[in-house]
Image: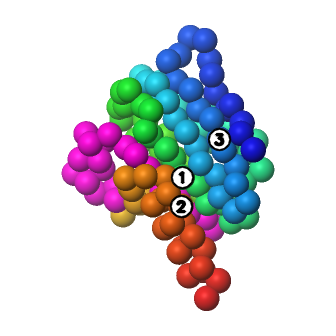
C-alpha cells in the first residue's frame, strides 16, 4: 500500500510511504533541507501510518537532491520514535556526502546505512528474528 505523506507546493520535498506486511519504506525525494520543522512533519505524518508493531522502517534517500542538518535531525527524531516503540530503523541509498557526515559525527551507532533498500530490509528482518529468539 502506498501513501503520499507530504507534498507541499511551497517545498521541493516529497515523502511517500510504502507499507509492507511487517515493515515500511519511507521514500524521500527532492530537497531534504532548509526546513526546521522536518522532524516534526515526519513524526506527525508517521504517526498517521498504520506501522507494524514493533515498527520497522527503512528511510530511502535515493532520490534526494540536497540535504542539511535539518534532514539529519529529522532522521534522528524518526529513529527515536521508532526505537522507543521497540522497532528498528535503517537508511538506504544515501548520497556519499551524507554517509561521510554520518560516519564523521558517529551516527552509525544510532542507525545503519545500506546501499540498497533490499539490504536495509534484510537487516531489519535479522533484527526482528533476533528479538523473537
Q: How far apart are marks 3 and 2 (CA)?
A: 14 Å
User: Could you tell me residue 78's position as x and y percent?
Assistant: 55, 48
Question: In terms of secondary structure, where does tag 3 sit?
Answer: strand
Q: Name the residue under label 2.
A: 121
- Using the image, tell me which numbered label, if any, was put on residue 8: none
First along the sequence among labels 1 and 3? 3
Q: Marks 2 and 1: CB-CB under 8 Å? A: yes
Rendered image quadrant of residue 80:
bottom right
Question: Horizontally, is 89 left or right of 109 in the view?
Answer: right
The residue that label 1 is drawn on is: 58
What range of the chain is rendered magenta?
A: 85-108
User: Badge 3 is on which residue?
Assistant: 17
Residue 55, horizontal then vertical, whole percent: 66, 60
Give residue 20's quadrant in the image. bottom right
Q: In which quarter of the image is residue 72?
A: top left
The quarter of the rendered structure image containing the N terminus is top right
The question of residue 107 being in magenta is answered with yes
Colouring style: rainbow
Sort mark 2 into few (<14), some (14-19) or many (20+) by Cα contacts within 10 Å.
many
How many C-alpha atoms fall within 10 Å of the one at disc 1: few (<14), some, or many (≥20)?
A: many
- Is disc 2 placed on a helix, strand or loop? helix
* Viewer-side label of 2, 1: 2
Q: Residue at x 64, y 52 (%)?
A: 24
The x, y position of residue 110, in whole percent, is 41, 60
Q: How crowded is mark 3: few (under 14 residues within 10 Å), some or many (20 or more)?
A: many
Q: Give me the residue at 59% from left, 32% from top.
A: 15
Say whether residue 131 is visible.
yes
The residues tagged by marks 1 and 3 sit, at their Cα atoms, a distance apart of: 10 Å
Residue at 50% x, 57% y is 118
Dot 1: what SS? strand
Amino acid at each position: 500500500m502506498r501513501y503520499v505523506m507530504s507534498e507541499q507546493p511551497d517545498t521541493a520535498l516529497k515523502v511517500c510511504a510504502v507499507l509492507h506486511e511487517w515493515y515500511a519504506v519511507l521514500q524521500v525525494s527532492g530537497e531534504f533541507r532548509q526546513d526546521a520543522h522536518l522532524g516534526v512533519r515526519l513524526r506527525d505524518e508517521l504517526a498517521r501510518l498504520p506501522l507494524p508493531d514493533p515498527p520497522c522502517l527503512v528511510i530511502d534517500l535515493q532520490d534526494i537532491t540536497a540535504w542539511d542538518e535539518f534532514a539529519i535531525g529529522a532522521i534522528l527524531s524518526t529513529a527515536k520514535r521508532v526505537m522507543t516503540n521497540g522497532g528498528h530503523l535503517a537508511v538506504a541509498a544515501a548520497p556519499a556526502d551524507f554517509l561521510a557526515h554520518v560516519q564523521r559525527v558517529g551516527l552509525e551507532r544510532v542507525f545503519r546505512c545500506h546501499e540498497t533498500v533490499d539490504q536495509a530490509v534484510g537487516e531489519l528482518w535479522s533484527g526482528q528474528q533476533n528479538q523473537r529468539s
